[in-house]
Amino acid sequence: MSLEPLLEDLLGSDPPVAVNAYDGTRFGPADAKATVEIRSPDALRRIATRPGELGLARAYVAGDIDLDGDIYKLFELQERLSTPRLTPAQFRRVVSSLGLRRLRPMAPPPEEMSPHRFGLHTRSRDAAAIRHHYDVSNAFYRLVLGPSMTYSCALFSDSSTSLEEAQAAKHELICRKLDLQPGMRLLDVGCGWGGMVRHAAREHGVEVVGITISPSQAELGREAVAAEGLADRVEIRLQDYRDIEDGPYDAISSIGMFEHVGLRRLGTYFQSMLTLLRPGGRFLNHAISRPPTDGKPRVSPNGFVGRYVFPDGELHEIGTVITAMQEAGFEVRHMESLREHYDRTLRSWVTNLENHWEEAVAEVGANRARVWRLYMAGSAAGFEAGRIQVHQTLGVRATDGGVSGMAPRPDWN
């Protein structure tokens, strides 16, 4: 039995991609920019038993389907499969095409992390979630991120700006917003592999403490600090932000860490940052956010990103973030969106991964490499369409007399 009637039923008569199936079926436009290869009946089992995003993602991660050509076309295909369940008639056709009487769910690929049941955003659960995402392989991340090893939105001045230049420009913008001066003490919360701490120490002469709860990041970050001769000015700690007790700091940066905090802990997080700052000190929060849709933090624990990429991650609407900062005692002085810059950053990472595909697969395995390709390309499409956003928000801990130390119209562009 040919799969063509089933594929047309699921995808319509004009799918955005071509489809080649394991039974020899060829379906879709001959001039398509991408071709989906259905390599196994297991692909249909996964999609039928978990229709929508997660079923399609499981089939792709497991290698039951693959995609040749433009990865971004896969997200147009996803829109065709976005319904929460198949109709009874569609389900019967899938079962019939597989020659089965019953259709049981398959075990998910081993890269999938089960959603939390208890203890969300405890220290131990956060540490496990961070290890799941960041302790994959430093060598793998270098292939994807490039020499800067910076895993957050870059800042592109024009079409000729390279990824490395754009990451340095992002770090410099944050340093200028924080008004870093020689001899100041900076805390970088969620320091990753140390890109920001090294830039701040090298270019602005500050003393820096960077914290991460990823052992792999801390190890490589310390090696990079030593290699640049910055060990007398930079310390990288394996430490949770809730355990820092050596304030005050003159400035605090938090770049790409806030997504792991959680809605219920926003007050704890911002109060911790305020307490660690001296009066007049500045705090820069750089984080992915979401539009004001349904009022809920957007990273579904049952979606692809929640299961495979950022377990327990939560994205917040920027108004909620600003309100929480001010309720904690900050005066918020500036906010800007870098949404289009993250789209370009992610596309650069996808290109890096695709250009080093064989090396990446050798380092972390085909399933894990497919997770990152799917995640980064899907995120790029999300930023392009405005379904997700990224903002830098600058707050200051004013003095008792209300003095912020800020210029009326700062010039840091």
Image (cartoon, rainbow, N blue to C red):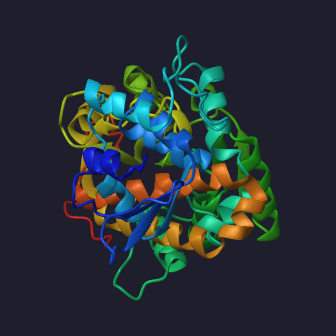
In the rendered view, does 135 fall on the left or right side of 65? Answer: right
Q: Front-most of 33 and 391?
A: 33
Q: Is residue 256 visible?
A: yes
Residue visible at 52% across and 22% down in the picture? 104
Q: Front-most of 159 and 77?
A: 77
Q: Position of residue 72 (x, y in %)?
A: 38, 64
Q: Position of residue 251 (x, y in %)?
A: 48, 49
Q: Is residue 406 visible?
A: no
In the rendered view, does 218 fall on the left or right side of 76? Answer: right
Residue visible at 44% across and 43% down in the picture? 56
Q: Position of residue 206 (x, y in %)?
A: 60, 61
In the rendered view, does 408 fall on the left or right side of 250? Answer: left
Q: How many labels sit on residues?
A: 0
Task: Spot the residue most to the top.
Answer: 118
**360 versus 235 height, above or below:** below
Q: Quadrant of the C terminus?
A: bottom left
Q: Position of residue 356 (x, y in %)?
A: 66, 72
Q: Front-most of 260 and 394?
A: 260
Residue visible at 71% across and 60% down in the picture? 361
**327 versus 168 height, above or below:** above
